[in-house]
């Protein structure tokens, strides 16, 4: 299987499912999961169960991206003193909510709030795949993220939020004395570089420039990247978590 076939940006094709990759690639994936998430030894088993029960949701790109973001969030929580210090994660505009579920599984004492306008089938598919007891410390909350009230010292997480969603997430965190971590998707120059008349760059350059401007605007304490082969929107910005 050519994992990037049909994907013009050179990334893993978003339509590739776990069931469609070769045995060799599967073995490489399971090894990667074990090495990338040593604190979650049952993660691979959860995705095997997901593939068996809901194969259409078990897409390789989603798995790799979620694991990569989870890695940065887990590291931030540990560096902040652990789940007992952080207390809660607010996974806003969570989509399928897999990152929040991984954090809930990794830290049983952490309360995870998965927030989006609607609950997606992929959320329930992975939730079921963990088996019993199925993540008693996570709750899905349907609604506008602007209505939430993060606890002081908690973490507000936003994976691939678009435009104003990133701003709302970071402002909510900063206003509550909480930490924040975002993996921006679409960004508008007017939000961060209002004096710029134009940004005549490639899409990749424009994204990097605007992420840098956002990091400067909000005083990001960490800037990291995901593997470019997973997604071209691959910069993680974070700040505010107390140690």
Image (spheres, rainbow, N blue to C red):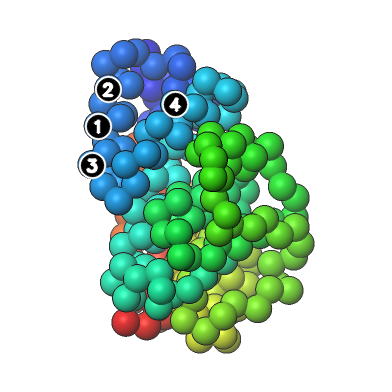
Local secondary structure at mark 1: helix
Give the mark nearest the N terminus, 3 or 2: 2
Give the mark nearest the N terminus, 4 or 1: 1
In three-dimensional space, the C-alpha distance between marks 3 and 1, rounded to whole angstroms, equals 6 Å
In three-dimensional space, the C-alpha distance between marks 3 and 2, rounded to whole angstroms, equals 12 Å
Q: Which mark is residue 31?
A: 1
Can residue 153 be seen here? The reply is yes
Q: Which mark is residue 48?
A: 4
Closer to the eye: label 4 or 1: 4
Give the mark nearest the N terminus, 3 or 4: 3
Q: Is residue 212 left or right of residue 160?
A: left
Local secondary structure at mark 2: helix
Give the mark nearest the N terminus, 4 or 2: 2
Q: Quadrant of residue 240?
A: bottom left
User: Mark 1 touching mark 2, by CB under 8 A?
Assistant: yes
Can residue 7 be seen here? The reply is no
- The residue lying at 25 percent from left, 32 percent from top is 31
- The residue lying at 31 percent from left, 29 percent from top is 29
Closer to the eye: label 3 or 4: 4
* Label 3 CA crowd tier, 10 Å (few <14, some 14–19, many 20+): few
Q: Which residue is mark 2?
A: 27
Local secondary structure at mark 4: helix
User: Mark 3 touching mark 1, by CB under 8 A?
Assistant: yes
User: Mark 4 touching mark 1, by CB under 8 A?
Assistant: no
In three-dimensional space, the C-alpha distance between marks 3 and 4, rounded to whole angstroms, equals 17 Å
In three-dimensional space, the C-alpha distance between marks 4 and 1, rounded to whole angstroms, equals 13 Å
* Label 4 CA crowd tier, 10 Å (few <14, some 14–19, many 20+): some
Q: Quadrant of residue 194?
A: bottom right
Q: Which residue is mark 3?
A: 35
User: Mark 3 touching mark 2, by CB under 8 A?
Assistant: no
- The residue lying at 45 percent from left, 32 percent from top is 47
In the rendered image, residue 120, in percent from the top left (x then y), is placed at: 69, 42
């Amino acid at each position: 299987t050519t994992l990037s076939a049909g994907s013009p940006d050179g990334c893993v094709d978003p339509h590739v499912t776990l069931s469609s990759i070769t045995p060799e690639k599967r073995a490489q994936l399971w090894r990667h999961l074990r090495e990338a998430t040593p604190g979650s030894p049952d993660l691979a088993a959860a995705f095997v169960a997901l593939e068996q029960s809901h194969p259409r949701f078990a897409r390789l790109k989603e798995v790799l991206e979620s694991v990569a973001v989870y890695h940065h969030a887990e590291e931030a929580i540990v560096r902040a003193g652990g789940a007992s210090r952080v207390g809660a994660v607010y996974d806003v505009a969570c989509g399928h909510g897999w990152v929040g579920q991984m954090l809930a599984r990794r830290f049983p004492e952490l309360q995870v709030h998965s927030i989006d306008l609607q609950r997606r089938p992929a959320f329930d598919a992975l939730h079921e795949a963990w088996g019993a007891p199925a993540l008693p410390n996570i709750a899905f909350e349907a609604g506008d993220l602007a209505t939430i009230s993060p606890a002081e010292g908690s973490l507000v997480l936003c994976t691939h939020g678009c435009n104003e969603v990133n701003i709302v997430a970071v402002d909510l965190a900063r206003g509550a004395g909480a930490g924040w971590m975002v993996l921006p998707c679409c960004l508008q120059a007017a939000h961060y570089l209002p004096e710029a008349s134009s940004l005549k760059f490639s899409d990749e350059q424009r994204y990097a420039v605007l992420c840098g401007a956002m990091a400067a605007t909000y005083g990001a304490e960490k800037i990291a990247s995901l593997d470019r082969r997973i997604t071209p929107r691959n910069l993680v910005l974070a700040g505010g978590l107390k140690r």
